[in-house]
Amino acid sequence: MSQQTARRGGAVWALVITSVAGFMAALDNLVVTTALPSIRKDLGGALDDLEWTVSAYTLTFAVLLMFGAALGDRFGRRRLFLAGLAVFTGASAAAAMAPGIGSLIAARAVQGVGAAVMMPLTLTLLTAAVPAARRGMAYGIWGAVNGLAVASGPLIGGSLTEHISWHWIFWLNVPLGVALLPLARLRLAESYGAGARLDLPGTLLVSGGLFGIVYGLVRGPVDGWTGSLVLTGLIAGAALLGGFVHHGSRSKHPMLPMRLFRSRAFSGINAASLLMFLGMFGSIFLLSQYMQGVLGYSPTEAGLRMLPWTGMPMLVAPIAGILSDRIGGRPVVATGLFLQAAGLGYLASVATADVSYAAQLPGLIISGIGMALFFAPASNLVMSSVLPAEQGIASGANNALREVGGALGIAVMSSIFSAQGGYESAQAFVDGLRPALVVGAAMVALAGVAALLIPARRRTVLATGTTEPAPVLETAAH
């Protein structure tokens, strides 16, 4: 076998291994949503418990994402990838066997830890294995597989829940993980980052701060907004996040340098990403329960009916990329966000206890087109807003903020739902859903305004002196 053939085989194996690992981590963001009514029926728990079954994963994933990448750079990317994959697989088995809602939430949090270590290393390992001339195609396949995971999450979760049991949405990861571990050990080459540094104080500050705020938002409707634990969580969380900002401004090697936010482009696209995911995740969390608990669809039927929204990026994203190349990313992203906001507003206006699917369909399609117009151009805007040497940090920060937005969205919109309605009857659910969706639409519209603040098309000057758009290097789009 020639050396060139061996390299090509190694690149193929790296693409398969990293794509499947990325699929697993991306899938677990939304795969739980259509199983929530069944989980609630089997394990009990109130709305705040259901929130944590999703947020425990997204929160630990978000706050440890950049730390996981730094660990891989310092101690070996393959070694840490294997460790993250093992933790994720073991936690998936623990979630499948969870005897109660508390143990399920704990297992989901550990899953997020594993995903945070594993996910950012998929791209660095893939980059190391694939020749520069073929990386664009490899990134495209990797991104398509991750997009498929996001799109199919509610459908896969619904189908497994209905035809086997909700436990299998977690068991699904176990054979995949067990198969990938020896393959990754044998087929991936070890690599290290240059001068990798660990920011433990920054990780602790942002982790504690985000946990405090999400805890306060989740428990507020249950314990009352003036409850001692709720106020402590919100105040301490805000103080710790303030400390994280100060640390990022003063430390020599912070996990997230605050100087990056001096760029209007970087600030604008990250604000847009956080607000987009806040509105989108919170809406999907409530709408998947509405379709089953109020409209009477089975888990599979609910997953299928969400596809015009969650699956639209698979069809429209290539068009979004072409438009972005021709007219720039800012107008495409802003248009997508305003369409997403319009779709959510429409769904809020037609939500009743007996609305037909035909009446909901325009809102789902508009939301799906909006989401599709956002994803691909947003990645390019992030990467082109910083210097080439800072693109790894920029990509990690953007993806962390997206996950944070998802966790905050579920907490904020569930709090609004609880204040205005509840699970007591179909009408009570609708009474809570409609104002929550209105707030979600407002958040995504605000994201559109943030996108308009991004400066006009910007190109990255390469070492050769030529100019071209910065490359897309994105960890999972959730």
Image (tube, grey):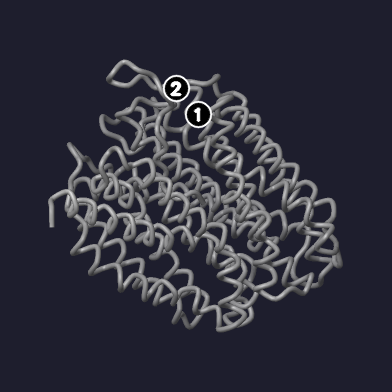
Query: Which residue in the structure is indicated by mark 1?
Result: 267
Residue 73 is at least partly visible in this image? yes
Identify the residue shown where x is 49% and y is 31%. 381
Which residue type carries mark 2?
Arg
Which residue type carries mark 1?
Ser
Measuring from the top left, give residue 124's x and y in whole percent.
29, 46
Which secondary structure, mark 2? helix
- Left/right placement of residue 240 relative to residue 431 reads left
Please name whichever residue, 85 or 199, is drawn nearer the observer in this view of the structure: 85
Mark number, residue 184: none
- Left/right placement of residue 337 relative to residue 180 reads right
Pointer 2: residues within 10 angstroms few (<14), some, or many (20+)? few
Q: Is label 1 in contact with label 2 (beta carbons under 8 Å)? A: yes
Q: How many marks?
A: 2
Mark number, residue 262: 2
Q: Quadrant of residue 274?
A: top right
Quadrant occupied by the N terminus: bottom left
Q: Say whether disc 1 or disc 2 marks the residue closer to the N-terminus.
A: 2
Please name whichever residue, 324 or 46, is drawn nearer the observer in this view of the structure: 324
